[in-house]
Image (spheres, coloured by chain):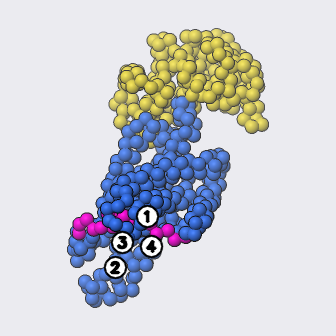
Chain colours: A blue, B yellow
Amino acid sequence: MENFVTGILINGLLIGTLYAIIALGYTMVYGVLQLINFAHSEVFLTGGVVAFEIFRVLSPAPGAEPGTGMNPYLVFAVALVTAIVVCGALNIVIERLAYRPLRNAPKLVPLISAIGVSLILQDVIKLLEGFQGRFQLAVNVPGAFTRTVFTVADTNVKGIDLTLLIVAAVMLFGLNRLVNHSRVGRAIRAVAQDRVTAGLMGIDSNRMISLTFLIGGALGGVGGVLFALKFPNLDPYSGTIPGIKAFSAAVLGGIGSIPGAVLGGLVLGIIENFLGSLSGLVFIFPKLAFLGAIKAEYKDVGAFIALIVILIFKPSGLLGRNATEKV
Amino acid sequence: MLELTDIHTYYGHIHALKGVTLHVMQGEIIALIGGNGAGKTTTLRTISGMQKPRMGTLHYLGQDIAGVRPDTIMQRGMSHVPEGRRIFGQLTVRENLEIGAYTVSDKATIESRIQEGFEFFPRLKEREKQLGGTLSGGEQQMLAIARALMVAPKLLLLDEPSMGLSPLFVETIFDIVQRLNRERGTTILLVEQNASMALGIAQRAYVLQTGEIRLQGPASEIASNESVRKAYLGED
């Protein structure tokens, strides 16, 4: 029983960390523009595609002599950096072309634009990869990442899992430092609250908004690479479900809040893992046979039901502020 | 120091300023009074570069600044305390001040100006770590002024600093404005609905009505003008 619970927690935390990283991209952009960047799921998927390409080109072919080819960790580092650059730049371009011209339009308009960008990017990925005869992208994950490093409570923790935790921890620390304790971070927060007055203070709000998209895109890129290592079979629609979940995680934690996005991701990961594992309880408590009917496939449904319930009681999210300001 | 000649400003099709001419000399406190919608705020927004004039000339320290971006104008020593204070409610008092010094790159200068601000407004020092949004209206006004002072302006534009404040705070704010002018030699262009207070501290004043300057002269003369007394000082 203990092992069962620990397993749920560990697996939930691992997948939750991934949601958290993607959720940060949604929440950063929302925080500064009050816009849900629906294209973020494809920006993130682009990170996965970058990882696929880098691993395809730089990794030794499956079945090759062990020890040949580039060091897998080096390949991973290259994939990470490339994804950060590509996705960061992509996000800046998206903002420039699809959102900036609509800056003063009613809020629904850029939202529609975001959905449009999301669909366009799906097709671009389909086109680029399909052109080379690929639709299902099976990422050639180096063995170093799939090997089990250690086992806790019957749960195997693999190389990719450890990598995920380390990268996520570094990113969260760095992001917190940047946003809350740097001059640029202060300027971003000022622009988020009041663009006109920030301009009066000499802050170029367009630059700060571009910077926010750069950060959001880079986070998405990192998330995409890690996602591709954990779930190596990608197709042009693979971004959608994790995207929706990460978005939900951001809302759950309180959209616009950085710690909220992380907490929301972790909570969502644990909830869905718990619900996905319910049928496993049958082996421990044979009397609860009905639980066997709750197949792992229902975990998404369960996760969203949990989301709705939490939001009914806490509409601003777990760490969201009901901002009432003195005017 | 500042000279507006026949300035016309539009909001879309609305002709907000219809040929405003005024000047501010070094070391003066100038009051710009007038009713709602007279164009007082628009005048300040035009001066600080937030609104582009369509016609007329706008000279500041000998340079034409019509259509120049607000951050550039600010770097030339002009600071604008906007209407309604517009402090950053989700940033702490200290962060608000640091944002005010965004265009200042030297850390030691920023720190010494923050300390100067705290000397001027001891109450802000007590609230240093608090979020701006948790301050009272009067404290927010102090913060807005302190934030504008972070660039050590030569010319300070103040838009309705007394708005929504208790009489005691209005008194405090006006004292501070006078002290700034006296002790630091900061030139001040003050927009006010509270005409009696503004005329009490200003050397000269302009009366703005529906986008045009109706009256101008020494503050004491304006204060004793029959029609001003009726319209803005609440006397019949």
Q: Which mark is residue A300?
A: 4
Which residue is painted at 47% across and 41% down in the image?
A189
Going by the numbered disc 3, the residue's amino acid type is Asn
Report how far apart the C-alphas of labels 1 and 3 lie in the structure: 19 Å
Residue B125, label in figure: none
Magenta residues, start to end:
A135-151
Residue A247, x across and y down, in percent: 48, 61
The answer to whether dots 2 and 3 both sit on one chain is yes
Query: Could you tell me the amino acid type at mark 2?
Result: Leu
Which amino acid type is marked by label 1?
Ala
Label 3 residue SS: helix
Identify the secondary structure beneath mark 4.
helix
Front residue of A72 and B123? A72
Q: Is A191 left or right of A112, judged from the image as shown?
A: left
Q: Nearer the N terminus, badge 4 or badge 2?
A: 2
**Nearest to viewer (mark 4 / mark 1):** 1
Q: Residue A273 carries which label?
A: 3
Q: N-terminal of the two: label 3 or label 4? A: 3
Q: In this view, does B203 lie to the left or right of A219?
A: right
Q: Name the residue under label 1.
A: A228
Query: How packed is label 3: few (under 14 Cα within 10 Å), some, or many (20 or more)?
Result: many
